[in-house]
Image: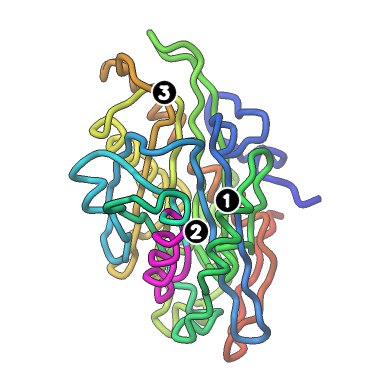
Amino acid sequence: MTPRARDLGLAAGPYQPGRHNAITDVAGVRVGHTTVRREPGIHTGVSAVVPGRLPLSAGVYAGNGYGKLVGSTQVAELGVIETPILLTATMSAFRVADALISWMLARDPGLPSVNPVVGECNDGWLSDMPARPITAEHVFAALDGARSGPVEEGCVGAGTGTVALGFKAGIGTSSRTLTLHGAGTVTVGALVQANFGGALRTSAGTHAQPGASEMELLGLDDGSCMIVVATDARLDGRQLTRLAKRGVYALGRVGAAYSHGSGDYGLAFSTAGAGEHVADRHLSPLFAATLDAVEESVLNSLLAAVTTVGRAGHTAPAWRPV
């Protein structure tokens, strides 16, 4: 079994993870993947983060907005998500959004309008993105197959063809439990679609490939990262936007370059029902736990991934700490 960051002593912070050390430790949250792989040129897919009920309070933050986060302006304006959150490849984002609307209408044909939320990363180093192989059936399979419990990581779903920090990456997840003043024990979980540039840093040092990578030589090392944060702490949209920011900030810990072509987005939502929100002055521990969970999620995405040879013979090597 592939070790996760925590097994190698690379997990950050004082807070303990939830049972599965995954975003699904937030009650009601499920994750599903559809992996689409056709050798040699197709390495892509869809990942779905499915809350137990909708709509929910949410916030979004664009650390660097070179991307296509479908539905983000309405989330920013109203502080609410109306659909599950789907992740995929850049050129498939709009097909996925269309399929998500169809999935929602099948469950409520009377919907007068709905705002699909779909994030993306450019997996074109390994996959033929213009082929746009994602179909509605792939989207439905990810949504209908979403489950609680352990989450598959690495080269799966929307992470099948992604690359981060010079190494093969993919989907990664982590969680933290903590006590918040006035709120009791709460959980925060993160899931990342890691695909960004920079030089990998951990507590053990910097892990750079020797010499310039082929991606760097071709100017294709910008990448992006989609970060989804879930919590059962009762927060409003403004507070969740602040939480989403911490998710993006966490990328700096692992060496993100935040380059010109990087689309780095955080999207946070709360599963809590109506009631009094946590006071701003008590949020700092939750911010810290989010930073830790996102950092560990990125490392888990790298550790779970395997060396992949994709289109035109392009290779993304796996990272294995010495």
Q: Does 11 appear above or below 70?
A: above
23 left or right of 150 in image: left
Q: What residue type is labelled 3?
A: Ala
Is the C-beta separation of discs 2 and 1 under 8 Å?
yes
> Callout 3: few (<14), some (14-19), or many (20+) C-alpha neighbours within 10 Å?
many
Q: Does 98 appear above or below 320?
A: below
The secondary element bearing badge 1 is classed as strand
Among all residues in the image, which is located at the extreme bottom? 312
Disc number for residue 222: none
Q: Which residue is drawn at 51% across and 26% down?
A: 187
Q: Which amino acid does label 2 sit on?
A: Ala
- The boundaries of the magenta stretch are 88-104
Closer to the camera in the image, 136 or 4:
136
Q: Residue at x 60, y 58 (%)?
A: 33
Q: Distance between the residues labelled 2 and 3?
A: 25 Å
Q: Which of the colour schemes (rainbow, by chain, secondary structure, one colour) is used?
A: rainbow
**Residue 286: x %, y % from top left:** 41, 25
Q: Residue 249 is drawn in which quadrant?
A: top left
* Mark in the foreground, 2 or 3: 3
Q: Which amino acid does label 1 sit on?
A: Gly
> Callout 2: few (<14), some (14-19), or many (20+) C-alpha neighbours within 10 Å?
many
Q: Residue at x 47, y 58 (%)?
A: 103
Q: Mark 3 or mark 2, which is nearer the start of the sequence?
A: 2
Q: How far apart are marks 1 and 3 (CA)?
A: 22 Å
Report the residue marked by disc 3. 233
Q: Is residue 51 magenta?
A: no
Report the residue marked by disc 2. 194
